[in-house]
Image (cartoon, coloured by chain):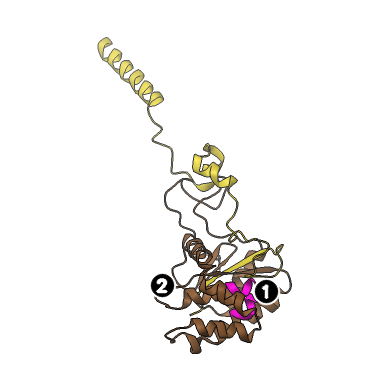
Amino acid sequence: MYPQIVKDYVETGKVRYVFRNFPLSFHNWAQKAAEAAECAGEQGQYWAMHEALFNGQEEWTGSADAVPIFKGMAGTLKLDQAKFDSCLDGDKYAEKIQADIQEGSKAGVTGTPAFSINGISLSGAQPFDAFKETIEYALAGGEAPSLTVPPDSYRSLGEANAPVVITEFSDFQ
Amino acid sequence: MYLKRTWLAALVVLALVVAACGPDMATPIPTGQATASTQAPTQAATTAVTQSPTTGPVVDPNDWRTLGSADAEVTLTEYSDFQ
């Protein structure tokens, strides 16, 4: 998450930021890392673990066994170690992560990172200005492209129930 | 001459009947505005009116993976992994 987005939009009450796990299958420790964040979350330290996992990527991504590293991070954050270890070893949040993946897939996510701003998709690592532009568009009442078109839309051509919808975003200059 | 007139009249009547009963082939492709004002809404269009806009996932109030106000106008959802 970009600090500038948090400062300009989240802390001002304009934007609510939601994180959803989408561990890619070829990232061997991504699923367990997501579970570690959830296990920290139940102890009120989700964002601290979130940051620790990203900042410590070099330490654990190439590891033969990243679980002890995740447990070490929990210790550094002064979590209840026994509770954290039990949570992580017991795969307590494995299904929650899978539910996130299903939710993301339904939203059209195929890679990471992927973003949805009031339903408007942004894929890949984007510059702050891309987020700013889309957020401002949404704040101004801009709508996400939709596969359904209201019958009273004067900005459409063709049948309302056509199987294909082409949405053009343009300006007149 | 009389027979010729009778046939002509019969052809005119036949043409009028066909034009009145057949499909309206002369109607141009409707524009969006014309569609909205002259056509009855289809099932799909009716559904569209009642659907809520897709603004993001349903978020549990106790979800620890959120930042910011629940009343914010905009929801930014990030799908990502840690690796």
Q: Position of residue A85 (x, y in %)?
A: 56, 77
Distance from Cα at disc 1 to Cα at disc 2: 28 Å
Mark yes or no: residue A116 visible: yes
Chain of the residue displaying label 1: A
Tell me, what hue is chain A?
brown
Please report the bounds of the magenta region as a residue range. A38-50
Amino acid marked by disc 2: Ser
Kindly identify which residue carries mark 1.
A44
Q: Residues within 10 Å of mark 1 (few under 14, many from 20)?
A: few
Amino acid marked by disc 1: Gly
**Image side of residue A4 versus residue A100, left or right:** right
**Number of marks present in the image shown:** 2
Kindly identify which residue carries mark 2.
A25
Q: Which mark is residue A23?
A: none
Which one is in front, B48 or A87?
A: A87
Position above or below: B83 against B9 = below
Which one is in front, A125 or A72?
A: A72
Q: Secondary structure at mark 2?
A: loop
Seen as rendered, the residue at the extreme top is: B2
Q: Residue at x 34, y 23 (%)?
A: B15
Which one is in front, A148 or A42?
A: A42
Mark 1–mark 2 CB contact (< 8 Å): no
Q: Secondary structure at mark 1?
A: loop
Q: Which chain is yellow?
A: B
Q: Residue at x 64, y 84 (%)?
A: A77
Q: Position of residue A171 (x, y in %)?
A: 55, 66
Q: Is A52 one of the magenta-colored residues?
A: no
Q: Position of residue A42 (x, y in %)?
A: 64, 71
